[in-house]
Every structure is written in C-alpha cells, then in structure tokens.
C-alpha cells in the first residue's frame, strides 16, 4: 500500500479514540488506491492528507431549562468538513451517543455523498448529545433555541445549510428555523427540511427512503429483477424507514420487519395499509415504541433484538435488506445469516449501517450492495433542490421533485458503476461511489491551490 496506509495510520494516531471516524476513513481510503496511481497531481498537492482533516470543528455548550425549572447543559457540535464544491451541507443529529467521532464520520461520508448528487454541496454534520426522548415539546423548543443561539453565527444559505438526521425532524427544524429568523432577521434557506408553509420542499420528508428504494431498484434491474412480491427487511422506524416501507409497498414488495431502539417486530403479512398508517402515527405523533404495533396487530415482537439479530435467530428468509436505523447495526454474523437465508440485495438507507466485515461478506457472496453514501443520497439531494427553490423563490410540484429525485438516483447508480469500471473494480458500488465522489472534490481542491 502507498500513501493510503500512511493517511489511515496518521488519522488513527492523531485522534486515537475516534473509532467511527477511523472506520469511515479506512473504508473510503482503501478504495482510492487506484486513484493514487492515476493522479500523481493529487499526491503532490497532498489531497489525500487534506481531505481527512475537517476545515473546522465547532464545539459549544447548550444550556437549557426543563419544565420543572431545572437547568441542563448539553454539548453542541458542527463539523464543517469540506466546502470545495459548494456550501457546507449535512444533517444535525440529536442522540445521547453523539460525539466528535460520530459527527466526523458522518461529515466525512457527507463529502462524497454530496459530490455524487450532481448538486453543488460541500460536506458537514452536527448535532448534540441531547436526547429528545421523553421531553415535552416545550423542552425540545427551549433546547433547539439554545442550540441555534450559538449555531446561527456559523451557518447561512451560502455558508452552511444544516438539516435533519436521527432525532431531528420537522418539529426540531421548525423551532430552529423560527429562532434563526428571529435573531438574524432574515427569511432565507439556511436549513432544509423546513415545513411547506415556510420554504420547505415537497418530497423532502420522503426523499431518503424513496431514494434508497429507487437505488435498490436500479441495482436489481442490472440482474433483471424488480420489487414485485419480494420479501423486504427494513430496520428503524423513523423518517428513512417509514418512507422506504411506503415506496416498497408502492412497487409491490412486502416489508416484514421494523425496529426501534427497544425492539423488533415481524409481520409476515406485510406492513402496509392501515398498519403502515399506524406506524406513522405512533412514531411521528405519539412518539411511542414499535412494540405497540405487535400488541395491536398480534404480530411477533422481539424485545432487545435488532432486525438483523431476529433474522439470524429466527431463520427468516428475506430477498432484500434495507438497513435504515443507525451505524454498525449489521455485523459479520448478521451478514452471513442474511446470505444464508437468501438475501441478494442490500441498500443502506442509514449511514454506515454495515460493519467492514459485513460489507466483505456481502461482496464476497456477490450480493448487490449499495453503500449509504450512494443509496441514501436522495435525502440530501432533495435538500439541494429545496435550496434551489428557496433561491429561485418558487416551489416545484410533488411530481417535479419526485421526477428529479428519481433521475438523480439513477444518475448516481450509473456514475458508481462507470467509476468502478474505469478504475478496475467492475460492479463494486463501494469503490465506485468513493472514487466518483472523491474525484470531483479532489479536482476542485486542486484548482484552488493550497488554501
Ligand atoms: P429517525 O430519528 O427518524 O429514526 C431513527 C430510527 O432508528 C428510530 O426508529 C430509532 O429508534 C432507530 N434507532 C436509532 N438508533 C438506534 C439504535 N442504536 N438501535 C436501534 N434502533 C435505533 O432518524 P432517520 O430515519 O432520519 O435516520 C436513520 C438513519 O438514516 C441514520 O443513520 C441517518 O444518519 C440516516 N440518514 C438520514 C437521512 C434523513 O434525511 N433523515 C438522510 C440520509 C441518511 P427510536 O424510535 O427508539 O428512537
Ligand atoms: O445523512 C444525510 O444525508 C442527512 N441526514 C441529510 C442531510 C441533508 O442536508 O439533507
């Protein structure tokens, strides 16, 4: 190995405890080996060393007062990783596990994902270790306002445009946007995922889930297969999972699993119709546990187990897997169980849900494997379209945005395959996504000189 090994080793030595970030850097860098040979100009300009270092990491305190009058303090972050091809862009995550390692991994992935979208967006990520679970609307509002009281000075429609991620949906974006508008006195596209009444785009809520299914459909089509009558495992029960389920149902597939951080449910008759509406109401309005689905519809519930544990332990047969919960949810054993039970396609709705060992199992067994930075790029793509609509001061129809989303996902699929082929990795979507995403950013960085 050439300088690639050095870069990975230096990242590990510099920030020894940032394991998720190390994992993401290693996965991307290993597939860039062939670009080193073809592009000595990148080596000379130290693009590989520079791309793993965030331009700026902002860490701040977020004090807030709960309903009982007690004072709390959380840690807020924004990692502005790379703005070579456009303003920083990427979601905000509110979850107790959030730390700098997780946000650096997500911000790093976002650079390549955003590059693949065909739209001009740099890579960033942010969030807080705040846990919205069990908090009242008023407490969430107070937290969001305190978070924005610091974040506002670092963002802007041409600087950095955050959006949602785990624990940040339309409610949180509304509170943050309202507060930004109040203190900056501007009505601009500084956040995406906004409500339709104040500058949001149609199809943004659906975009990540729909996009992941569009991407899976493109991969399946290379083998002459479609979603009709296929058995699909989806993990998570949040924004991405819900709209993945909706699109699979529309395409004639059958989703048999969902999970949250408490349990997994299995419904062999398929999660659709009234049962699907129940999930949306349960998770988006009542904010309850997925276990209630099993209680109501008499399906099976496995407390404390992930979808992938259940598939392994119950010998469930699935054709297609759509992990839509969180990072590293599928390990090597889960992957081997999926292969054993007949799965032939995995499209990552979540970011880095498959461990490196799991990816190796999928690829060694010739599964169609779509990595998150390609398969879940639909969300940020429609965020980019929301930015365009805000700049144009108009709103496209649902059909128009959905058509653009579908075209972008097809384009990303094609770009991955073409880049993989051109760099000697035929059919490898991981290498294709990393190489194509990287080349655009690297060329822009080269053009700027050393800045
Ligand atoms: P949500 O907060 O809407 O939903 C997350 C879901 O996953 C919830 O059901 C949650 O359970 C479950 N979950 C989270 N952590 C765990 C865990 N450790 N174990 C089991 N279940 C867990 O988030 P999103 O749907 O927006 O995000 C899901 C994934 O998709 C993330 O990886 C995110 O980075 C990625 N993503 C999101 C995009 C977007 O546009 N929102 C775009 C691209 C990628 P519970 O209900 O108990 O909280
Ligand atoms: O991981 C992601 O791509 C997101 N959470 C969406 C980012 C965005 O800016 O829409």
Image (cartoon, grey):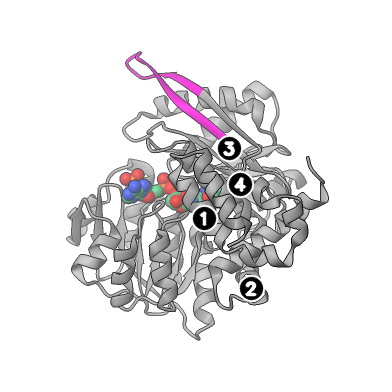
**Residue 70, how many percent across, how many down?**
34, 14
Q: How crowded is mark 1: few (under 14 residues within 10 Å), some or many (20 or more)?
A: many
Q: Distance between the residues labelled 1 and 3?
A: 19 Å
Left or right, residue 59 beside residue 71? right
Indicate which disc residue 177 carries. Answer: none
Instruction: Identify the mark nearer the N-term, 3 or 4.
Output: 4
Q: Distance between the residues labelled 3 and 4?
A: 12 Å
Instruction: Identify the mark nearer the N-term, 4 or 1.
Output: 1
Q: Distance between the residues labelled 2 and 3?
A: 30 Å
Quadrant location of residue 211?
Answer: bottom right
**Residue 320, how many percent across, how many down?**
39, 72
- Give the magenta part as a residue range: 61-79
Q: Determine whether the residue tagged by mark 2 lies in a helix, strand or loop.
A: helix
Indicate which disc residue 414 carries. Answer: 2
Instruction: Identify the mark nearer the N-term, 2 or 1.
Output: 1
Q: Does the residue labelled 4 lie within 8 Å of ligand 2?
A: no
Indicate which disc residue 26 carries. Answer: 1
**Residue 19, how many percent across, how many down?**
43, 45
The residue lying furthest to the bottom in this view is: 224
Q: Judge depth for marks 2 and 3 and give the one in front.
A: 3
**Residue located 58% across and 23% down the image:** 150
Quadrant location of residue 190?
Answer: top right
Q: Judge depth for marks 1 and 3 and give the one in front.
A: 1
Q: Determine whether the residue tagged by mark 1 lies in a helix, strand or loop.
A: helix
């Amino acid at each position: 190995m050439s300088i690639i090994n050095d870069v990975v080793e230096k990242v590990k030595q510099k920030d020894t405890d940032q394991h998720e970030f190390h994992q993401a850097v290693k996965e991307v860098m290993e597939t860039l080996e062939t670009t080193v040979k073809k592009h000595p100009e990148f080596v000379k300009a130290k693009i590989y060393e520079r791309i793993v270092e965030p331009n700026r990491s902002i860490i701040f305190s977020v004090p807030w007062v709960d309903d009982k009058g007690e004072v709390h303090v959380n840690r807020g972050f924004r990692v502005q990783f790379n703005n070579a091809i456009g303003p920083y862009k990427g979601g905000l995550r509110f979850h107790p596990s959030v730390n700098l390692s997780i946000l650096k991994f997500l911000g790093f992935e976002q650079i390549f994902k955003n590059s693949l979208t065909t739209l001009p967006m740099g890579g960033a990520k942010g969030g807080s270790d705040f846990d919205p679970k069990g908090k009242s609307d008023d407490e969430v509002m107070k937290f969001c306002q305190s978070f924005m009281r610091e974040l506002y000075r670092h963002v802007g429609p041409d600087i950095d445009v955050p959006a949602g991620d785990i624990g940040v949906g339309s409610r949180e974006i509304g509170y943050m946007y309202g507060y930004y508008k109040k203190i900056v006195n501007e009505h601009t596209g500084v956040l995406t995922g906004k409500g339709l009444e104040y500058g949001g785009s149609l199809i943004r809520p659906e975009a990540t889930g729909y996009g992941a299914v569009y991407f899976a459909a493109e991969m399946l089509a290379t083998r002459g297969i479609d979603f009709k009558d296929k058995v699909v495992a989806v993990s998570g029960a949040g924004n991405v999972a819900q709209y993945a389920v909706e699109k699979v149902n529309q395409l004639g597939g059958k989703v048999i699993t969902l999970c949250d951080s408490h349990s997994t449910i299995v419904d062999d008759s398929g999660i659709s119709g009234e049962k699907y509406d129940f999930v949306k109401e349960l998770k988006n309005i009542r904010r309850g546990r997925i276990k209630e689905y099993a209680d109501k519809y008499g399906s099976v519930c496995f407390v404390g187990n992930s979808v992938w544990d259940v598939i392994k332990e119950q010998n469930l047969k699935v054709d297609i897997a759509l992990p839509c919960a969180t990072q590293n949810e599928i390990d090597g054993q889960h992957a081997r169980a999926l292969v054993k039970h007949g799965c032939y396609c995995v499209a990552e709705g979540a970011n880095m849900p498959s461990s490196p060992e799991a990816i190796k199992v999928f690829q060694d067994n010739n599964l169609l494997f779509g990595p998150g930075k390609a398969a879940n790029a639909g969300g940020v793509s429609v965020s980019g379209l929301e930015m365009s609509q805000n700049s144009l001061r108009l709103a496209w129809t649902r059909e128009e945005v959905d058509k653009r989303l579908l075209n972008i996902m097809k384009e990303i699929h094609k770009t991955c395959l073409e880049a993989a082929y051109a760099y000697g990795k035929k059919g490898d979507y991981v290498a294709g996504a990393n190489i194509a995403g990287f080349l655009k950013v690297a060329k822009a960085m080269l053009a700027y000189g050393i800045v």
